[in-house]
Amino acid sequence: MSVTTQAPAPAALATMSRPAAGALRATLLLAQWQLRRQAQFIPLLVVVQVFMAVATVIGYGLLVGNPDPATALFLATGAPTITLITVGLVMTPQMVAQARTEGSLDWMRTLPVPRWAFLAADLTVWTLIALPGMVLGIVAGVLRFHVDLSLAPWLVPGALAVSLVSAAVGYAMASLLPPQVAMLVTQALVFIVLLFSPVSYPSERMPQWLQGVHEWLPIEPMAQLVRSGLAHDTFDMPLRSVVVLVAWGTAAVAGAAAALRHRA
């Protein structure tokens, strides 16, 4: 006795793929809606990124004067990293906290789309918003410090990963903390990223206890990933930093998704 199996009909395949296609379409539409909703603020965000990138390069240049080649390379590669991290860890939670306060985030959750689609759409938007500032930071650093970069093949995906992880951490922070507390934390993070994180200088300059703290935080791995992508001949990306970065990104996405489900 033989058993004949038939391949699913095209209509059946289309039916099975409909939920996934619908969720993807919903995510893209939500991202488009978010971009249109923030259309009046995006030019201001770009201006802030330009100012931050140029001010970081010029400000650090004033502090160190005429740096040696190694220090100049750290400063030139640190400026774009600071822009990426600041957009994700500071601007993203501020906007999410504002949306929670004004009620627009609650209104969006009443739409008949999967909860994870909101998270995916927002992370997509904030990941893309951070990229122009990074490019301008690279240009400003090269022009100011006259360094030669050696771009790695993974620079673009690495920059996207840093932007995505920082936006995910910022989104999770704004989703899990009360809006007022999230706002205060973002203000503290500005000074931590600019002054007390090994982004524009090597970690060896920090106290031993602070080096130990940054071994478990995502800021140093983000800087290492961007730095190794911009100056591949000089810097590398340790495997431990990759693991830390992946762990933070996974935990942040899980925390934000749990907050969305809890408030559904």
Image (cartoon, rainbow, N blue to C red):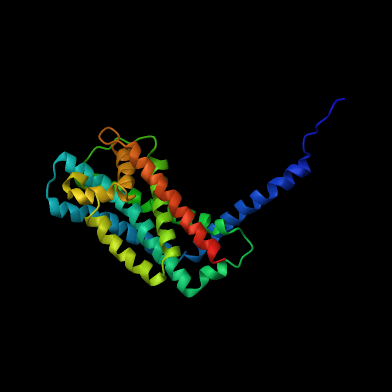
x, y percentage for residue 194?
25, 56
Is residue 75 visible to us here?
yes
The residue lying toward the viewer, choosing from 63 and 164, is 164
Identify the residue at horizontal 47%, vertical 69% (top origin).
Answer: 99
Q: Residue furthest left?
A: 65
In the image: residue 199, left or right of residue 93: left
The residue lying toward the viewer, choosing from 36 and 95, is 95
Identify the residue at horizontal 38%, vertical 48% (top origin).
Answer: 162
Q: Residue furthest bottom?
A: 102
In the image: residue 158, left or right of residue 54: right
The residue lying toward the viewer, choosing from 98 and 83, is 98
Is residue 202 visible to us here?
no
x, y percentage for residue 113?
62, 60
Quarter-wise, where is residue 52 in the image? Answer: bottom left
x, y percentage for residue 205?
16, 47
Q: Quadrant of the N terminus?
A: top right
Identify the residue at horizontal 42%, vertical 49% (top origin).
Answer: 249
Quarter-wise, where is residue 87 in the image? Answer: bottom left
In the image: residue 36, left or right of residue 63: right
In the image: residue 29, left or right of residue 102: right
Identify the residue at horizontal 57%, vertical 66% (top origin).
Answer: 264
Q: How many labels does the image show?
A: 0
x, y percentage for residue 130?
39, 54
Q: Residue furthest top?
A: 1
